[in-house]
Image (cartoon, grey):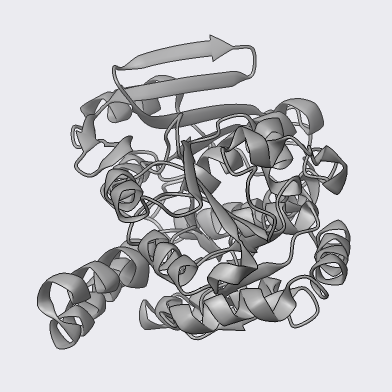
């Protein structure tokens, strides 16, 4: 058995990455790399899609991009279909643990690798509630409600077959419990994500931001959204909501992000006080935008965590969202308003109800919540000191249940990062 100071090689494997618009998973990968290099003696291999296959080794960090084609209607994403280069990278570096961060194809690449190297621990991060967000909501638009329910059930069956191969599964909150139960995932770990409260801070407000967005002529509340501009995120509903805000309120809306609906929504919002500045890759720039706005809005019904929500709250913005997914665990009457899913009239009324008298106090309450409960170090302390040790313990038990006399040499991590 290795000592607690053994250097492990941990591998992240995901399709859900983009240098532009990669959202929560991209931020997670970046913050995990920082944590590993600053707070542990371990090595980290991160495998993501890219325009070409390349491997860059930089000390204890190994960054690997696998050639992948683009995703139709999602200009910032690529999808790996040829897994041979991944298999070659895994065989080359032979990680002690693989963490899979997406549900499609790549989990099975990890599973097949583990079958050749039984001591490898497998962890699945349930970052997207895919039966609802990626299957049900798409199928409902295409085929109607009943067929959408069938395809959701099918996706849960797929999840059951997939996740039973993993040593541990974690989710980003209790909101995914229903689908995980349908997948017969028992006793999943729960983990929160984090935010840098020194970067996302109300002091980053810039009085010139509204003018910079071309909205300097407005005097009412400046609403802001940051995320993919697509149906999954409910971006089209935000435009519908904005149309229902009384004109005399003189509100404005900034929609940060890219996606399949960008051009369509730009045309639909012509003549309205709405700006589409594109994707903001700089976290400091996003913090400035959030802190310079008044209210954060989101119509996304299937958030597993809602990182953009806590970033907005860290900048002392109240949040107006929908009563579904992770929103109820982040947004309370003290720091925002939740409305029924799809009720754009109620969302517009919520803007009217809190502006201007309740905005400042709600924002302060949101900031206090984030300072109290969300930090990246706490996230990865839990991952490395609780989730990973459980995975290695399960892997040890699995190996011992293997063929009689099979006793491979492997590393065991007991949780001290």
Where residue 275 appears, as percent x and y from the top left, is 49, 44
Q: Looking at the image, which residue is at 40% across and 51% down?
A: 271
Q: Looking at the image, which residue is at 19% across and 72% down?
A: 141
Q: Is residue 118 above or below residue 340?
A: above
Where residue 300 appears, as percent x and y from the top left, is 46, 67
Q: Looking at the image, which residue is at 37% across and 82% down?
A: 182
Instruction: Note whether residue 286 is visible.
Output: no
Where residue 68 appears, as percent x and y from the top left, is 24, 29
Q: Is residue 335 above or below residue 112?
A: below
Residue 332 as seen in the image, left or right of residue 300: right
Residue 223 as seen in the image, left or right of residue 133: right
Residue nearer the viewer, 405 or 186: 186
Q: Please state, as top left, top right, bottom left or bottom right, where the C terminus lies in the image.
A: top right
Residue 229 as seen in the image, left or right of residue 52: right
Instruction: Note whether residue 39 is visible.
Output: yes
Q: Please state, as top left, top right, bottom left or bottom right, where the N terminus lies in the image.
A: top right
Quadrant position of residue 259: top left
Residue nearer the viewer, 148 or 225: 225
């Amino acid at each position: 058995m290795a000592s607690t100071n053994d250097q492990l090689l941990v591998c992240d494997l995901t399709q859900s990455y983009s240098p532009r618009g990669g959202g929560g998973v991209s931020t997670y990968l970046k913050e995990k790399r920082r944590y590993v290099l600053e707070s542990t003696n371990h090595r980290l291999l991160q495998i993501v899609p890219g325009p070409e296959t390349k491997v860059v080794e930089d000390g204890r960090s190994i960054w690997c991009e696998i050639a992948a084609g683009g995703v139709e209607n999602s200009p910032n994403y690529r999808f790996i279909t040829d897994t041979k280069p991944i298999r070659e990278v895994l065989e080359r570096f032979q990680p002690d643990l693989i963490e899979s961060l997406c549900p499609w194809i790549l989990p099975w690449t990890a599973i097949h690798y583990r079958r050749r190297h039984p001591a490898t621990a497998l962890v699945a991060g349930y970052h997207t509630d895919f039966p609802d967000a990626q299957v049900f909501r798409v199928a409902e638009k295409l085929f109607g409600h009943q067929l959408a329910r069938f395809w959701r059930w099918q996706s849960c069956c797929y999840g059951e077959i997939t996740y039973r191969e993993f040593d541990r599964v974690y989710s980003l909150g209790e909101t995914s419990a229903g689908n995980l139960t349908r997948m017969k995932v028992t006793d999943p770990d729960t983990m929160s994500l984090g935010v840098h409260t020194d970067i996302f801070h109300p002091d980053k407000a810039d009085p010139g931001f509204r003018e910079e967005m071309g909205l300097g002529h407005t005097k009412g509340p400046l609403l802001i959204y940051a995320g993919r501009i697509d149906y999954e995120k409910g971006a089209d509903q935000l435009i519908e909501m904005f149309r229902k805000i009384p004109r005399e309120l003189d509100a404005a809306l900034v929609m940060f992000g890219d996606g399949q609906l960008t051009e369509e929504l730009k045309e639909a919002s012509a003549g309205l006080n709405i700006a589409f500045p594109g994707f903001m890759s700089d976290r400091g720039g996003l913090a400035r935008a959030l802190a310079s706005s008044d209210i954060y809005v989101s119509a996304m019904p299937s958030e597993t965590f809602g990182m953009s929500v806590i970033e907005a709250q860290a900048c002392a913005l109240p949040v107006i969202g929908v009563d579904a997914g992770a929103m109820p665990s982040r947004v309370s009457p003290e720091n925002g308003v939740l409305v029924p899913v799809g009720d754009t009239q109620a969302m517009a009324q919520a803007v009217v109800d809190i502006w201007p008298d309740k905005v400042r106090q709600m924002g302060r309450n949101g900031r206090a919540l984030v300072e109290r409960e969300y930090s990246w170090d706490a996230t990865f302390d839990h991952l490395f000191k609780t989730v990973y040790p459980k995975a290695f313990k399960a892997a040890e038990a699995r190996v011992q249940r293997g063929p009689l006399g099979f006793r491979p040499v492997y590393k065991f991590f007991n949780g001290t990062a």
